[in-house]
Every structure is written in structure tokens, then in C-alpha cells.
Image (cartoon, helix red, strand yellow):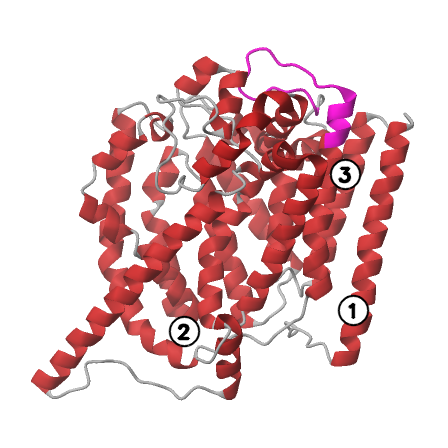
Amino acid sequence: MHSSPKIYPARAAESAKVGAALEVLGCLTAVAAATLCFLAGWLTCDEAAVFTLLLLLSLIGLAWKRFDGGRHPCFFFLCMLTLFQAGRLIAYCCGGERDIFRVTLMTPYPFDVSREVAGLVLLSIALSAICIYAPCRWNYRSFSPPRSGSFERFLPYLYLLFGLSVPVQLYKNFCYYRYAKEHGGYLVIFVDHGGMAASIPVAVRAISLISLPALVGICVLERRQQFLRTATTLYFAITAPILLLGSRGATFSLVLSLWYLAKVKSGRRARFYSVAFLGAGLVLAGSWIGSFRAGNLESSVLAGASQFVAGQGSSINVTEVAFAYRRNFAPHIVSNLADELRSAFFPTDHRAYVAGKNFDADVSMFLNPTAYQMGNGSGSTYLAEAYLAGGLWGVVLVSALLGALFHRMHRYSRNPLGLFLVAMILPDLLLMPRGGLLDWASASLRVGISLFLLLAGWGFYRAIARIGGILWGSNWALDHRVPKSPMQILATEELFGGSP
């Protein structure tokens, strides 16, 4: 049987905070001791890397246990941080990687960084994980599953939008797939994104923005499992053309976001084997999907899970380059961050490179200009950009703010509207260990536009329904208002900071 989340009484809250303080203090003490041993020369770089990996895995285990089976954005972020920044460390422990800190990403001439840089990178990863976990653990409170209540009146409207937008979304995905195949494959997404987008009518691109918000809304409100499974399966089926191109990051992060939504909605503690099965499935699927990328041998399904994880962990090379050559990149960090605020609307064109505009592009040009012009890229990471902006203290501050953000997201998930917004924003946040520091903010603006379209369509839907009710004398409105319970009124007041 699944156990329900524990609701902490007032007295238990104090003991929970004491336990949280001891956990965080223990982690910091271990990091401080390891740092002193590293500085004294008693720990090699490889041994320090193994210690960092053990710390990350310990924090993931703590997040799983303390957050009622990982029902918290912090748990998923720590998992992604471990994959993208410590994937090579995992491969090293499994015997699949020998030189953990050698920079091999993109460059035709691999090079090593100094021992000091390697140690600083490991320290930043460890401190970031602790600073993210600490505010989430300190403020964590379980809550009952959110009740749909009066929000259920939106279900017919959401199903209508989903049914109308799915064919359009499928058509758009197929056109993108065909355009990419005709113009060089997966890399055309980065080399000629403007041409790919222009090959689709603007109306088609606008309508396709509705399918994902409609699906997330259905997942939040729908209680009938057969309807929920059908809608989810249908949505992921229409993403097949994009997956066949080799693009997988957005889809996989959406899977994790919907998994979090389902667990919060059910209020049940997930079983560990189900999480392990999900993780193994995503690794194998990622390896298989990566094999569709033209010339990307590292993502071949035949390479095995160890090499796939090592390839995902290559983002640590970006962190190393930023730390080692901070003087080269730090002067442009402000313009880099400003460009990320528009990244969701204006993707980077590799053929129109401007020095100092985009950190991802600057690192890629630094490592291999020819490969970047052909469409390859190194990606970014919030750790590197935070370090460029403020050094190690910048990493600590940004990580603490992320932890506070994840706490607020968990708190807002107790309300259906808040859970919808969290599920829409979470996929981009989960990609931060290999993405920009502010890419998620740009994506949030796009979510706001989608929400505005939904609300505008809802007004139009209700107007048509009322006209139909007047003409045919029946209740077309499908707007069965349910009185709000006191619990829902309090949740709405807490979400918006005022009376509903």
C-alpha cells in the first residue's frame, strides 16, 4: 500500500527543523573536511570527485526520504544536476571513463585543467547541491493533494482545445522533421532555425502553443485515469517526429515534470523501484533517440548506458572552461544574461555569431569554431554563469535562490492553478545544469503568453456556449460552478496574496 504524506503538527515542525539543520551542517562539515584534505594534498582529484559523487547521491537519497518519496522539485533538480555535472564521475566509478577532468567536449585537441580548477569545480558542485537542498529541507511541509473543485468546469474546454490543437501540432512536428531531413538532419535546428520556423505558417505555430498547456491542465484536473492516460499517450505520440530527429531534452524534462504532477496530485508516496525503472527507461530511450543524430556516435544506442551517462555529463567541461578562463568570459556576462531573457522567442543562430552575446556560443567558439559553425554546441550551465558573475559566492547565492524558488513552487502546488504553473515552468528549470542561468525566465514569459491565450479562449468559449444555450434552450455552457470550500478559499488567498 502507498502511504499518505505526513502532515507535521506544530511541535513536530520544530524537531523537523532541528533535523534539517543537523543534516545541512553534517554535509557542510564533510565538504569542509574534504576541502582541507584536498588542499593538504591528502586527496587526489579523482578521490575528491568520488567524494563529490557520494555527496550528491546522499543528498538525492535524503531528498527522496524527507520529501515523501521525492515529491518536490528539489529532488528532480538534484537528479539532473548529478547527471549533467557528475555523469562523467558516474562513468568513472563504473570503469567507463579514465580522465574525468580532461576537456574533450567539441575540441579536436583535448586538454587538462589545473588541479586548483578541478578542485574548485567540485567544490562549486557540492556547495550548489547543499545550498539548493537546505532551504527546501528547512521549510518543507507536506500537504494534502490539491482538490479540483470549481476548476473542473474547465475540463470540457481543455479537452476541446487539446482535440483541436493535436492535429495541428502533429502537422508542425512532421513539417519540422521533413525540413530537417531535407537540409542536413538534426543540426539544422541550430544552423537554420529561422528557415525551419518560416516553413510553417504563423497560424500553425500559434495554435500549436496551446496543446501543451491544454495537456497539463487536463493532467491537473482529470481524475479518470483512462482519459488521463489516453491524452498523455496521444501527446507524446505526436512528438515522435521530433524524437526521430534526435531532440530529446525538452521531452524528457516534461516527462519528469508530469511525474511530479501526478505524485502531488495523488498524494501517494512513490515506490523506489518505480523511480529506478523510470530513470533506467529514460537513459535507454535517450541513448536510442540520440542514435538518430547524424554523426553523433556518442549517443549511439550500442555505446551502452555508461557511455551515454558520460556523454550527458560532458557539461562539466563547460564548467571547467568557465572557471579556468574566467577572465575571457566574465566581461560579457551581463550581455549573456540579457540575451537569455529572449532565448525562448529568438533562438541562437549559429551562422550569425556575435562575440560576447551568448555564453553558449562563446564557449563553443573557444573550443571549436568550425564545429560551432556547422551546428554543434557545448551548451551552458548555471554553475558556470553564476561563477562568472560572482565567483564562488555567486554560485552559493544563485543556488540558495534556486532552493528558495523550489520551495515556493512546492508550496504553490497545493492549489490547482499553482500546480499547473509549476508543471509548465519546471521542465526548463530542470535543464539548468546544462542550460543558461535565465533561460527558464524567458520560458516563463512564454508560459504567460500561453496562459493568456487559454484565458482569452475561455471567454470566447463561454460566449459561444451561452449563445448556444439561448438558441437551443439547453445548457451549453458546461460551466457547472461548484461552491468553493474553505480550504480552496484559503489556498487561493495564499496563492494570490489577497481575497479570491
Image side of residue 494 versus residue 460, left or right:
right
Earlier sequence position, callout 3 versus callout 1? 1
Quadrant in which the N terminus appears: bottom right
Q: Which quadrant holds residue 412? A: bottom right
Q: Position of residue 360 (x, y in %)?
A: 50, 29
Residue 388 location in percent, x, y?
Answer: 62, 32
Q: Which residue does the numbered mark 3 point to in the structure image? A: 52
Q: Residues within 10 Å of mark 2 (few under 14, many from 20)?
A: few
Task: Report the amino acid beneath label 1.
Answer: Ala
Q: Which residues are magenta?
A: 100-120
Give the residue displayed 80% in from the left and 26% down from the top.
45
What kind of secondary structure does the magenta stretch mostly adopt?
loop
Give the left or right position of residue 97, taking residue 115 as reference. Answer: left
| Helix, strand or loop for disc 1 | helix
Q: Amino acid at mark 2?
A: Arg
Residue 301 shown in magenta: no
- Name the residue nearer the viewer: 257 or 309: 257
